[in-house]
Amino acid sequence: MKRQFAFLSLLLSGVALLAACGKKELPVLTVGVIAELTGDIPAVGASCKNAAEMAVAEINEAGGVKIAGKAHLLRIVVEDSKGSGPEAGEALKRLASEDKVFAVVGPNASLGAIPAAEAAEEAKVPMITPWSTNPLTTAGKKWVFRACFTDAFEGHVLARFATGYLHAAKAAVLYDPNSQAPNSQAELFRKDFEEAGGKIVAFETYKTGDKDFAAPFARIAAAAPDIIFLPSYYNEVPLQIKQARKLGIKVPFLGSDNWSSPELIKLAGADVEGATFCNHYAPEVRVDAVARFVTPYRNKYGQTPDDVAALTYDSFKLLAKALVAASRPDREAIREALSKIREFQGVTGKMTFKEGSGDPVKSAVMMRVEDGKPVFVTTVDP
């Protein structure tokens, strides 16, 4: 099914609680979710859907949200973008016109988030993307917000980490120029790495769907870099690193937040040991806000939540904060309330929004793969 309704499962406990208390059934606000449930990165979509359901269940169990003094429950309608840009744009149009949603959370990957953001702007429906880091997602838009940092900040973080922490003087890059986030991250990393005094000795590309990376890795090996920056998605990295290791490349790999899914380590195995990557939060960091999210998620879904899950959860709690502050339950009032939020403390850290911007200023974390699991290395502040 392309569309998934999550009304009964998410409202059951809240409605039962209200009925037990002898209260009337509350009005319901419909929120759309666009997730990559099928296609190339289904683990991203699964994390988004899981966290959305958990966040909304918590909100409803607590009595919903009060808008202008009147409590409302939330209902979500999930659309599958199939990891496709055009599908994501069409999904948002359907949610806006057919389901009359008050807001949309997702898509996650920038490939889908950019066209969805354009559709949200045209339909005048508030949209929060949990995981899209490409600056184009929110650029020039008043209806689109994000819960994650941008590629501009991530490029700066990675360059600082590469030169200052790893002491790399020479770097190589391999990326897909037709994929929105990897392309943006590669270009911004090159800029910041060179500004930090480093030298890019190879800047190689591949095409979406490629399975043979021998030629670009041969050129990279000949350039003798200290590190290789690989901003590929989690489903591509295992094959790429495996081929690099077979060619005798032993230098460390550096990844972006596109690496964040646990599926990467499962697929890559020992080949990815010692690699470092940028991420939006560290689930093992002992902070109350993190523990209150991670433990229930593990209990419910049997796995540790990745950054997409954490960012989706934060997106819904950010939306809930806006709903409480909204003057009335309509799209314009919700957008206005979102635009007035200046600070928000979430699972993925403190977000600070400057006036007129839908992009939060927030910290990033660096993770290293050790003994088959990601381990926290350091936090990099803005």
Image: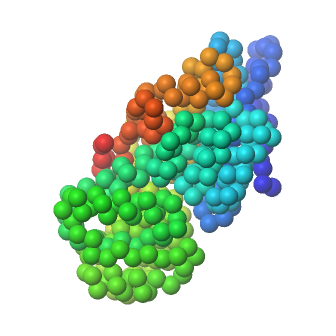
From this viewpoint, is residue 47 visible?
no
Question: Residue 339: image x %, image y %?
Answer: 51, 29
From this viewpoint, is residue 340 visible?
yes
The front one of 184 and 262 is 184
Q: Is residue 240 left or right of residue 198?
A: right
Q: In the rendered image of this protein, does residue 24 appear above or below residue 199?
A: above
Marker count (numbered)? 0
The front one of 76 and 325 is 325
Colouring method of the image = rainbow
Quadrant housing the C terminus: top left
Quadrant housing the N terminus: bottom right
Occupied quadrant, residue 370: bottom left
| Residue at 44% in and 56% down | 257
Occupied quadrant, residue 355: top left
Question: Residue 96: image x %, image y %?
Answer: 73, 39
Question: Residue 379: image x %, image y %?
Answer: 31, 47
| Residue at 52% in and 65% down | 179
Q: In the rendered image of this protein, does residue 199 appear above or below residue 361?
A: below
| Residue at 78% in and 43% down | 5
Question: Residue 207: image x %, image y %?
Answer: 52, 76
| Residue at 67% in and 53% down | 88
Q: In the rendered image of this protein, does residue 132 appear above or below residue 213?
A: above
Q: Is residue 301 left or right of residue 354?
A: right
